[in-house]
């Protein structure tokens, strides 16, 4: 067995892994990055980037359909699935090539193969062993399913849905979270009949109730159907269709069933527990600095309990690389990490919900303000309805910012700054927002919470 020694060995080349590799190499470390598939991971190849390309194509289709409303004569002839696929794959290929170039330029050793953690702070790949002064575990996640629900045939994960060469006539989406509502939005815009099945009482159930209800209204107006509050019982399929039965006996039939019930940590069979790493329900347990209980072993990304977001993994990868290099890097609370769901309309948030704020501080100590995007000039121009909701502690800082509407994902960074800096609305009210922009809606909310609403009564 050949032994290769490095300052840092990283198992997994997704967002967290490659970010750690790039930053560590900047700091003078000799780095080995082990990846069984392609560097970039799920986000680049099967998740964030390709799905957002689909969502953009869906947005263009919707714009063509509604072009007459702004005086443009246009008609939508068809969705060219091959053309959409070529566009999506072209975006991914360009990003992948750029990432490969960065990694090569930084002198990072990329090892292609399936790695397994060993007990001596090393990772074995076939007959080779890569030993690191430190090892970062960044093995990512996989699409989960429900007990008794077998993936295959007309029952798909999100990865398989991306590979479809057709637009289904009818589709059922099992799960009303981020992945579910994004695919529902795409397929509806492409012309499919869509029904979402969600066991919890609301779509995007982790968001503030104002956003959940607002998205439900928007989907209802669009014609996206949903069934809430009843659990899935079974799915049956033949060569032509799939039928879903709920626990109340209600049934739905469609061409395909997309299983979008979340993602599980990809840690099984990789030697973690044998090497002394504490694993609970598949997740690697770490302290606030992202250290496992084994000296020299760290973990980042989707295998660490918490939000499963590419930018969270990226942030953690950079932080771990800097800590390994001896830098003092403060931990970032989960409440300061922005969240965006890229359906139409978009959902974006940071901080805590009004319900969570009341639970933490009491109803009398929490103030929430909602601003309707109908009062925002740019939102009216681009034709989006929606809401800005800001939650603050009474006479205290902003605790949460919650947005619903087209393109509001581009606004959430301002909310993130407000929450992370524990800003008071009075601090933000004097700031100038360019006119006409959607960012003015946030400014209006800050003004109102500071006691001087401008365009609202």
Image (spheres, helix red, strand yellow):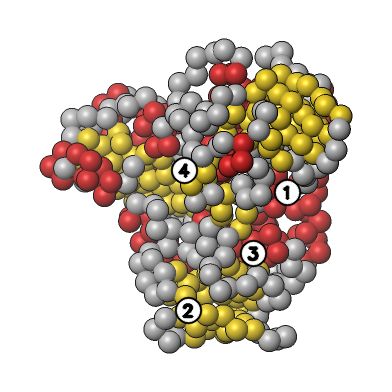
Cα separation between marks 4 and 1:
22 Å
Measure the C-alpha gap from mark 3 to mark 4: 22 Å
Residue at position x 38%, y 45% in the image: 402
Whichever of callouts 2 and 4 sits on the residue coming sooner in the sequence is 2
Which residue matches tag 2?
233
Measured in 3D between alpha carbons, the distance from the residue under mark 3 to the one under mark 1, in whole angstroms, is 14 Å
Mark-to-mark CA distance, 2 and 4: 28 Å
The answer to which of marks 2 and 1 sits earlier in the sequence is: 1
SS at mark 1 in the image: helix
**Residue at point 56%, 55% (across, down):** 263
Left of 27 or right of it: where is 218?
left
Quarter occupied by the N terminus: top right
Q: Residues within 10 Å of mark 4 (few under 14, many from 20)?
A: few
Q: Percent from the top left, x then y, of residue 384?
A: 47, 55
Judged by depth in the image, the label closer to the viewer, 3 or 1, is 3
Q: Are marks 2 and 4 in contact (CB under 8 Å)?
A: no
| Element class at badge 2 | strand
Q: Nearer the viewer, mark 4 or mark 1?
A: 4
Q: Mark 1 highlights which residue?
A: 45
Q: Which residue is mark 4?
A: 306
Kindly tell me whether residue 88 is visible in this rendering: yes
* Residue 372 spot, x, y in % from top left: 34, 51
How far across and down, in percent of the image, does residue 403 sit?
Answer: 41, 47
N-term mark: 4 or 1: 1
Mark 4 element type: loop
Name the disc covering residue 157, or none.
3
- Nearest the viewer among 130 and 359 is 130
């Amino acid at each position: 067995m050949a032994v290769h020694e490095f300052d840092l060995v990283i198992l997994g080349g997704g967002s967290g892994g490659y970010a750690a590799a790039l930053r560590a190499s900047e700091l003078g470390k000799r780095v080995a990055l082990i990846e069984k598939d392609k560097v970039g991971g799920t986000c680049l190849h099967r998740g964030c980037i390709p799905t957002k390309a689909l969502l953009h194509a869906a947005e263009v289709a919707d714009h063509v359909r509604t072009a007459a409303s702004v005086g443009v004569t246009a008609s939508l002839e068809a969705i060219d699935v091959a053309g959409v696929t070529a566009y999506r794959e072209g975006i991914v290929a360009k990003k992948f090539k750029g990432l490969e170039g960065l990694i090569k330029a930084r002198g990072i050793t990329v090892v292609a193969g399936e790695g397994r953690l060993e007990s001596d702070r090393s990772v074995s790949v076939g007959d080779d062993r890569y030993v690191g002064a430190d090892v970062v575990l960044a093995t990512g996640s996989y699409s989960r399913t429900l007990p008794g629900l077998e993936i295959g045939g007309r029952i798909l994960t999100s990865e398989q849905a991306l590979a479809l060469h057709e637009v289904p006539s009818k589709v059922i989406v099992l799960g009303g979270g981020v992945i579910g509502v994004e695919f529902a939005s795409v397929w509806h815009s492409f012309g499919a009949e869509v029904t979402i099945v969600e066991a919890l009482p609301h779509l995007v159930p982790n968001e503030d109730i104002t956003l959940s209800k607002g998205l439900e209204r928007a989907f209802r107006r669009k014609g996206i159907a949903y069934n809430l509050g009843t659990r899935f019982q079974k799915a049956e399929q033949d060569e032509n269709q799939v039928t879903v039965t709920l626990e109340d006996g209600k049934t739905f039939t469609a061409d395909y069933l997309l299983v979008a019930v979340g993602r599980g940590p990809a840690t099984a069979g990789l030697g973690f527990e044998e090497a002394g790493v504490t694993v609970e329900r598949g997740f690697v347990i770490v302290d606030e600095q992202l250290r496992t209980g084994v000296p020299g072993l760290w973990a980042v990304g989707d295998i660490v309990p918490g939000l499963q977001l590419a930018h969270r993994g990226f942030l953690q990868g950079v932080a771990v690389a800097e800590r390994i290099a001896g830098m003092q890097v403060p931990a970032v609370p989960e409440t300061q990490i922005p969240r965006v769901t890229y359906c139409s309309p978009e959902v974006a948030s940071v901080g805590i919900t009004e319900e969570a704020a009341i639970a933490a501080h009491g109803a009398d100590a929490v103030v929430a303000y909602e601003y309707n995007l109908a009062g925002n000039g740019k939102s009216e121009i681009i034709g989006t309805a929606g809401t800005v909701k800001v939650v603050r502690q009474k006479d205290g800082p902003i605790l949460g910012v919650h947005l619903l509407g087209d393109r509001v994902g581009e606004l959430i960074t301002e909310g993130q700054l407000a929450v992370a800096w524990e800003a008071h609305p009075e601090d933000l009210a004097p700031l100038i927002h360019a006119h006409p922009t959607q960012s003015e809606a946030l400014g209006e909310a800050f003004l109102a919470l500071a006691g001087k609403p401008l365009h609202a009564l």
